[in-house]
Image (cartoon, rainbow, N blue to C red):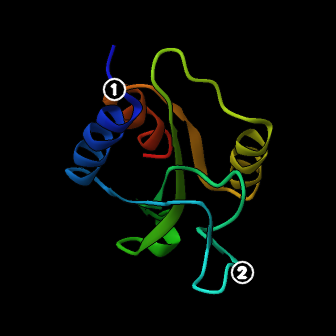
Amino acid sequence: MKSEREVQARIMLALGRGLSRVFRNNVGVLPDATGRPIRYGLCTGSSDLIGWTSQTITPDMVGKQVAVFTAVEVKNNKGRPTAEQTAFLTAVTNAGGIAGVCRSTEEALALTDRLV
């Protein structure tokens, strides 16, 4: 079984060859020099990979491109998204973005091709 890290690296490479650009989103908390907690990343539950997918708009805007927010939660075959991760994916989808859980490059490519 591939590690989640390996799946993530393969997905990033595969999506980068198409209309999507995704970036690693590290989320967590670490103490600063005084011991005060510093939070980093978008928010609790935000996806492993975030970025955009280019889409060509309807006939009245022919030739223009828009960037559709894209969130990919990467899991290996056994991994399951947390409630916070599911809520983030739902929020992105409800706002018109592209979001989902992917366990392979094929799933990630299928996810980002939905609007094409």
Residue identifier under label 2 = 36
Residue 110 shown left or right of residue 11 in the figure: right
Image quadrant in which you'd find residue 32: bottom right
Q: Residue at x 41, y 32 (%)?
A: 4
Residue 79 image position (x, y, % from top left) = 56, 23
**How far apart in space, not on screen, are marks 2 and 1 (Cα)?**
42 Å
Q: Residues within 10 Å of mark 1 (few under 14, many from 20)?
A: few
- Mark nearer the N terminus (2 vs 1): 2
Residue 34 locus on image (x, y percent)? 65, 86
> Which of the pair 93/102 is nearer the observer?
102
| Three-letter residue code for mark 2 | Arg
Q: Is residue 71 above or below residue 59?
A: above
| Label placed on residue 106 | 1
- Residue kind at label 1, given as amino acid type: Glu
Around disc 2, counting alpha carbons within 10 Å, would you say few (fewer than 14), some (14 to 19), or many (20 or more)? few
Which element carries disc 1, helix, strand or loop? helix
Residue pictured at 68% horizontal, 46% vertical: 89
Q: Secondary structure at mark 2?
A: loop
